[in-house]
Image: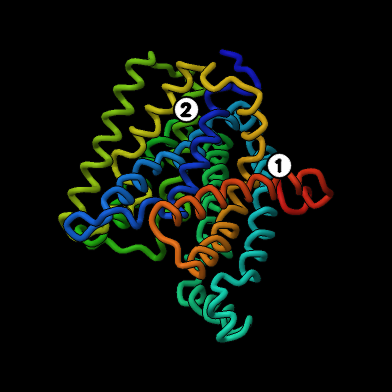
Amino acid sequence: MKTYPARIASLEFMRVIAMAAVIAIHTRLFIDAPIINGHAWLADIVNQLSRFAVPFFFLLAGFLIQPKLMGSPLAVMRRYNAPLLKVWLVWSAICLILPANLKNVMELGYLGERQAYWSFLLKTPLNSFLEGGLVHLWFLPALIIAVVMTGLFVHFKLLKLLLPAAVLLYIYGVLAGSYASVTEIGSPFLTRNGPFFSLLMVAVGFEIRRFEFRLSAQSALLMLSAGLLGHFAEAYWLFTKEVAFSSHDFLLFTPLWASGLFLLLLAKPLLGDHPLTYWLSKSILPIYVCHLSIAIVFYNIAGMSAVSGLTRDGVLFFGTVICSLAFVKLVEKTPLRKFLFR
């Protein structure tokens, strides 16, 4: 069995890039760019180009947990998921308490602003439960569920069924998600949440390591390119069916795109090998859980300042990046790190 270093530079480097991509999605970069035929195409393209990020995080989780999960699945499931569950609960509570719209706070008061948001969440209780206190936190319960399901396949010695089951769930997730208006397939909650997408991505990362699967850099790049082109072709076709181009978290070709990227990084393990990469990458989960709350602050600042265009993009993106990093690095030096972060 191949032994890997504790930290592979290229994977750590991509953690940092993927986190920047998530922030780009949530700050809606270039939304004020010139409109072409009624659409902010530059914003839509940047949005979809950034959609490799969360699939990459799931792939990485499966890859890293594979050796431990094979040895003692039930114990590892508990040890791995308990801190994630704590982080999800803590940040859900924080996000439920923090006001999001300062203008509404001034007009309606704190409780008026918050009650409107709480009422919105209660309209879809199952979906809200699978997300948490703010929309981006869906990643944590989805990861927990995927790790539990993968661990159960290991425990019951059903690993031959892991990928087939994950593929079936994924296909349903896409057909009842981005393709729902075409297929008219329903779902009790948004299929981005739960196991529909997370299980396949975690399982692919798990199996890449279990079978020591590798591609050359050229083959991985070809795989990545085919997946990326397929993803964009799907997004455009759905756009012709009146599905918003920027609305897709996962499409049928997304796993090919993300897996090609992951295999390319394994083929280039020294990419990004720099002390700054490791200093940043160790804080990615804390940055992930706090960044949207900080972005909301900058949304309010940009709104009250009436800035637009590149100024608005700079305030939101760089303000969120810098303040999220500063907040996390400051908290990591205090006892609060054990409460707020994994």
Q: Nearer the viewer, residue 248 or 4?
A: 248
Judge the density around disc 2: few (<14), some (14-19), many (≥20) Cα neighbours within 10 Å: some
Q: Position of residue 172 (x, y in %)?
A: 32, 51
Q: Position of residue 298 (x, y in %)?
A: 55, 60
Q: Decide: is 10 above or below 47.
A: above
Residue at 63 percent across and 36 percent down: it is 73
Q: Which residue is mark 2?
A: 207
Q: Decide: is 263 above or below 287.
A: above
Secondary structure under the numbered disc 1 in the rendered image: helix
Residue at 52 percent across and 45 percent down: it is 146
Q: Decide: is 135 above or below 4.
A: below
Q: Earlier in the sequence, mark 2 or mark 1?
A: 1
Q: Is 289 on the left-hand or right-hand side of 43?
A: right
Secondary structure under the numbered disc 2 in the rendered image: helix
Picture quarter containing residue 6?
Answer: top right
The quarter of the rendered structure image containing the C terminus is top right
Q: Which residue is mark 1?
A: 79
Judge the density around disc 1: few (<14), some (14-19), many (≥20) Cα neighbours within 10 Å: few
Q: Position of residue 127 (x, y in %)?
A: 47, 65
